[in-house]
Image: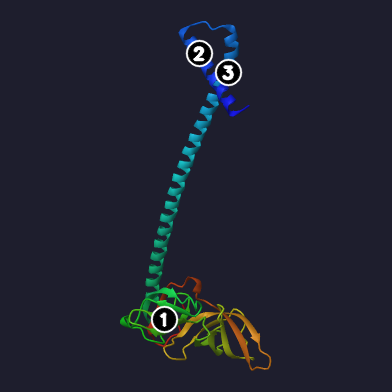
Amino acid sequence: MSRKSWMILLLVIILLQIVLIAAQEQGVAVGTPLRVFAWPLYRGAVVIRDSFSNLVYRFRSQERLIEENLALEEKMNQLIMENTLLEETIQQLISELDARRIEREIPFEIIPSQVVARDPYDWMGRAIIDKGTEDGLRENLLVVTYEGLAGRVEEVHPRHAVVRLILSPSLAIGGIVQRTRDLGVVTGDGSGRCIMKYVYQTSPVTVGDLVVTSGLGVDTPRGVVIGKVEAVNTLGGSMFKEVLIEPSCDFSSLEKVFVIQSFSQEDEVHF
């Protein structure tokens, strides 16, 4: 059927429904032929109307559910953000409390500092702290955390300073194996570990031994923990061993540090 034919048929059905409904409302008897013809059409229209109404109701219900879900999701994201901010505040408070406790325990004159940046071109080698010459900093001062050695002040500016981390091959610090008393030079290997050089082949150093600063060198206190021996490699044709050290300081979360301003070498201290 053409579109025009469908429109005519639809118009006839609507007119018949109107006649049938009007006749019933006025109490007028409708002839059997007309009833037989129109009643199924009327019932079909009622079914279509109810189905359409149900469809509209479901659509509106689904629309309300979507709106409610979006509102709940927005609220949940807001709560997650507030919870994250709260956790960060708690962590900062814990860090401050730890810092104050460490300040009381470390037998050195220290300057508490905050790491404000890491060198994107030398992530393992350099960090920037928020203290400078105005706070009493100078070059070569040792930088530590509550876990152990972090590095040494390399550059100083009025309000910030650059720290050369112990992970860098450019920094060398005198170390001593606590158990065997073997002396050596500790430097970074550039990949997150440290190497202790100039340990003699005859040394009984082994995995798990603790390595601390020897106190040799400028502005270097004795007994600051560097790390533990992770592996010992024998170098063929050399009189020295290569001692691989896992640093005690967690450089992945380096935030609060302490710059050792002055110290006494009377006692060996570990922290």
Q: Amino acid at mark 3?
A: Leu
Q: Which mark is drawn over residue 41?
A: 3
Q: Earlier in the sequence, mark 3 or mark 2?
A: 2
Q: Can you give x and y, in whole percent of width and height, for residue 84 in the image? A: 43, 58
| Neighbourhood count class around disc 3 (C-alpha, 10 Å): few under 14, some 14–19, many 20 upward | some
- Residue at image x 49%, y 10%? 23
Residue 61 in the image: above or below residue 45: below
Instruction: State which mark lies toward you, 1 or 2.
Output: 2
Q: Earlier in the sequence, mark 3 or mark 1?
A: 3
- Residue at image x 57%, y 81%? 245
- Residue at image x 53%, y 21%? 11
Q: Which residue is denoted by mark 2 in the rendering? A: 19
The span from disc 3 to disc 1 (Cα, nearest Å) is 88 Å
* Residue contact at pointers 3 and 2, CB within 8 angstroms: no
Q: Can you give x and y, in whole percent of width and height, for residue 186 in the image? A: 53, 86
Q: Which residue is denoted by mark 1 in the rendering? A: 162
SS class of the residue under badge 2? Answer: helix
Residue 87 in the image: above or below residue 60: below
The span from disc 3 to disc 2 (Cα, nearest Å) is 12 Å
Q: Amino acid at mark 1?
A: Val
Q: Amino acid at mark 2?
A: Val
SS class of the residue under badge 3? Answer: helix
| Side of 226 relative to 201 (left or right) | left
Q: Quadrant of residue 141?
A: bottom left
**How has the structure been colored for display?**
rainbow
Q: Quadrant of the N terminus?
A: top right
The span from disc 1 to disc 2 (Cα, nearest Å) is 94 Å
